[in-house]
Amino acid sequence: MLLSVEPAVLGAYTLAASAIVISPGPDTMLILRYTLTSGQRVGLATVAGVQLGLVVHTVAAVLGLSLLIMSMPALFRAVALAGAGYLGWLGIQSFRAGVLSVSEDGVRVGAVKAARDAMICNILNPKVIVLFLALMPGFLRPERGDVPAQLVTLGVVLILVNVVWQVGLTTAAEAARRWLSEPRVQRAVSWLTGLILLAFAVLMVVEHGLG
C-alpha cells in the first residue's frame, strides 16, 4: 500500500505531519495527565485511544464524510462546539482532581476510561478534520489512481508518527512521576493541565461558536 504514494511525496508528508503532531494540543495534554496520574500503562491506553480517533478520521476521509462536514458550516460548528464542551469538561475534572495521584495507592484512572476520553477528544477535535482536509489533499496524486489507497497510506503514516511521539511522551512522563511526590507540585500540574484544556475549549468556542 505504501507504493501508492511516491517516496519523495511520502517523505515530505511525514515531515509535515511530524511538525503538526509534535506541536502541543489536547491529545498531548490528556496523555501527559493520565500518565502522570495513573502510570505508563494507562498513558499507553490513552495513546491507543488517540489512534482509534485517527482511524475514525481516516475512514471518514476515505468515505468523504469529512468533506461533507466541512461543506456544511452548521454541522462543522456543532462538531467544534461538542469538542469544546468535552475539552472543557476534562479541564474541570482536572481542577476537581486537585492533587495528582502518583502514588501506588492513589485513585487512578482506568485504561478503558483513558482510551475512551482520548478517542472522543480526538474525534471531536475540528483541527483534526481540518488537518485531513488541508494537509492530506496537498500530497495526493490523482493521476496515480486509487485515491482511497493514498488516503489510507497517509492516514497510516500519521498514526505511526503519532505513536512514536506519544509513546515517547508517556515514557518521559512516567520518569517524571518520581519527582511529583510534593503535593504542591502535583496540584500545580493538575491546575496547569486543567487551564490548558480549558484554554483550548475557549479558543474552539471563539473560533467556531461566534460570528
Image (cartoon, grey):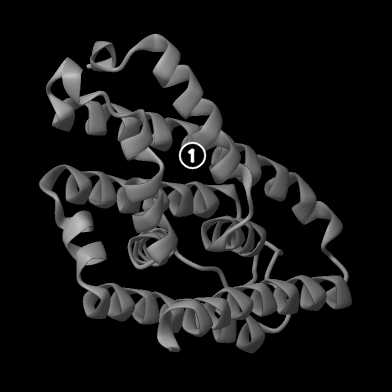
Pick the front one: 175 or 208: 208
Residue 48 percent across, percent down from the top left: 40, 47
Position of the N terminus by quadrant: top left
Pick the front one: 208 or 58: 208
Pick the front one: 138 or 121: 138
Left or right of 59, for residue 119: right
**Eyeballing the image, is 106 above or below 114?**
below
Give the number of marks: 1
Residue shown at 41%/20% (left/top)? 10
**Eyeballing the image, is 17 above or below 49?**
above
**Eyeballing the image, is 176 above or below 33?**
above
Residue 180 percent across, percent down from the top left: 82, 62
Residue shown at 52%/83% (left/top)? 206
Q: Secondary structure at mark 1?
A: helix
Question: In terms of image quadrants, where is residue 210?
Answer: bottom left
Residue 143 percent across, percent down from the top left: 18, 19
**Eyeballing the image, is 97 above or below 44?**
below
How many residues crowd around disc 1 within 10 Å: few (fewer than 14), some, or many (20 or more)?
A: many
Residue that numbered label 1 is attached to: 162
Residue shown at 86%/71% (left/top)? 185
Position of the C terminus by quadrant: bottom left
Residue shown at 63%/49% (left/top)? 23
Residue 166 percent across, percent down from the top left: 56, 42
Q: Amino acid at mark 1?
A: Asn
